[in-house]
Image (cartoon, helix red, strand yellow):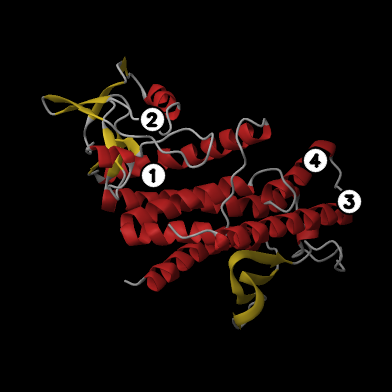
């Protein structure tokens, strides 16, 4: 397949995740009798739209193939609402409204398990050796480690005479010597050898790196094992997201964001690697989308649930127009951030 074909596969995969998310909102809203007037995948000018016979919903595809939305009657605080209209979101019960909002993230989270199940079943499970200090060398064999003669499966014993026991210690030792030749003792089979890589730094005052990683191997899995992994892996994505946000909010980690272009490149690369890698990555992204949307920020599902939580606790609704304004500001902020990140991604060279 050509790079264009892989890009199309990536876009279709990401579009599927959006369809699943909005499909969750749509099905929950319909289950509670709400009227859904529009189901849109993408923004901007409409490329295609269709309204099935005897349906109140117009399904459409926008020219910008990222983001999506369902338009539920009564959600817009500025539209005229008939208090007798039982199909309006504004007149639905609290349980119905919470269900309609939470169903999108939940659909993504559950779909992540489906994708991961088939990804693990087809491609097996990648098991990382985190204890023996065995290494994997960069795939292009162009990094300092590869140039010095280090090979996949070598075990690092010492650096400059200092015994190495874990990866954190290795990173500290190598990172403190950018540009300096290191004496690395390795074990290869029954032999003990010395190699002399020179760590490189991405920029001045940055830690040195010799471009190695932890040794890993792919282990085939049974249907039962794939099922277990499909349930245990999505929670790890949620935990990582929460921990990452915590580190950023406490200024322990510099914020790093990926926009649609960068994510599309990652998915295209995964598709090129194989269907199993593609499915696993889509599964990770689906779980991430579900978790991210539950964050209590304006415009996200979590922001709407925050207002509904206030209603449940106080037994009175928040002012609909104030809530609408808050979400509108949040949406504008998110779209601006996405535009800036996308512009930055387009300027970055492809790897």
List x then y, in percent, for residue 110: 48, 49
List x then y, in percent, for residue 193: 17, 26
Q: Which of marks 1 and 2 is in front?
A: 2
The residue wearing badge 3 is 319
Task: Name the image quarter holding the C terminus.
Answer: bottom left
Please tell me whether mark 2 sits on a helix, a strand or a loop.
loop
The residue wearing badge 2 is 180
Q: Is residue 34 left or right of residue 167?
A: right
Q: Residues within 10 Å of mark 4 (few under 14, many from 20)?
A: few
> Which sits earlier in the primary sequence, circle 1 or circle 3?
1
Q: Which of 96/149 is in front?
A: 149
Gap in angstroms between the C-alphas marked 4 and 2: 59 Å
**Residue 230, label in figure:** 1
Q: Please identify the residue farthest to the top as the structure is shown.
A: 162
> Which sits earlier in the primary sequence, circle 1 or circle 2?
2
Residue 50 visible? The answer is: no
List x then y, in percent, for residue 94: 75, 48
Residue 57, by quadrant, is bottom right
> Which sits earlier in the primary sequence, circle 2 or circle 3?
2
Gap in angstroms between the C-alphas marked 1 and 4: 34 Å
Task: Name the image quarter holding the N terminus.
Answer: bottom left
Q: Which residue is drawn at 48% across and 42% down?
A: 202
The residue wearing badge 4 is 310
Gap in angstroms between the C-alphas marked 1 and 2: 44 Å
Residue 77, by quadrant, is bottom right
Residue 99 visible? The answer is: yes
Gap in angstroms between the C-alphas marked 1 and 3: 41 Å
> Which sits earlier in the primary sequence, circle 4 or circle 2?
2
Q: Are marks 1 and 3 in contact (CB under 8 Å)?
A: no
Q: Which of 175/286 is in front?
A: 175
Residue 22, by quadrant, is bottom right
């Amino acid at each position: 397949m050509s790079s264009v074909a892989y890009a199309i596969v990536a876009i279709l995969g990401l579009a599927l995740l959006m369809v699943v998310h909005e499909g969750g909102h749509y099905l929950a809203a319909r289950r509670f009798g709400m009227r859904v007037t529009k189901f849109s995948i993408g923004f901007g000018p409409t490329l295609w739209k269709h309204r099935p016979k005897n349906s109140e919903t117009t399904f459409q595809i926008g020219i910008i193939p990222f983001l999506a939305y369902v338009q539920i009657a009564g959600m817009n605080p500025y539209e005229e609402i008939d208090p007798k209209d039982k199909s309006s979101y504004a007149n639905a019960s609290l349980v119905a409204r919470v269900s309609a909002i939470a169903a999108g993230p939940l659909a993504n989270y559950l779909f992540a398990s489906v994708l991961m199940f088939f990804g693990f079943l087809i491609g097996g499970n990648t098991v990382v050796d985190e204890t023996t200090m065995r290494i994997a060398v960069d795939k292009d064999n162009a990094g300092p480690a590869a140039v010095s003669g280090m090979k996949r499966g070598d075990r690092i014993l010492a650096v400059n005479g200092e015994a190495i026991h874990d990866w954190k210690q290795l990173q500290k030792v190598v990172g403190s010597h950018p540009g300096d030749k290191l004496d690395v003792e390795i074990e290869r089979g029954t032999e003990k050898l010395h190699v002399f890589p020179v760590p490189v730094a991405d920029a001045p005052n940055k830690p040195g790196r010799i471009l190695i990683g932890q040794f890993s191997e792919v282990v085939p899995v049974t249907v039962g094992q794939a099922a277990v992994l499909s349930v245990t892996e999505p929670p790890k994505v949620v935990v990582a997201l929460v921990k990452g946000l915590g580190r950023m909010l406490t200024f322990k980690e510099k914020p790093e964001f990926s926009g649609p272009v960068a994510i599309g490149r990652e998915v295209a690369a995964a598709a090129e690697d194989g269907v199993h890698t593609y499915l696993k990555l889509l599964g990770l992204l689906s779980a991430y989308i579900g978790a991210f949307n539950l964050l209590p920020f304006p415009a996200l599902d979590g922001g709407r649930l925050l207002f509904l939580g206030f209603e449940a606790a106080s037994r009175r609704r928040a002012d609909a127009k104030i809530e609408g304004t808050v979400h509108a500001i949040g949406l504008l902020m998110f779209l601006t951030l996405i535009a800036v990140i996308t512009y930055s991604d387009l300027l970055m060279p492809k790897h």
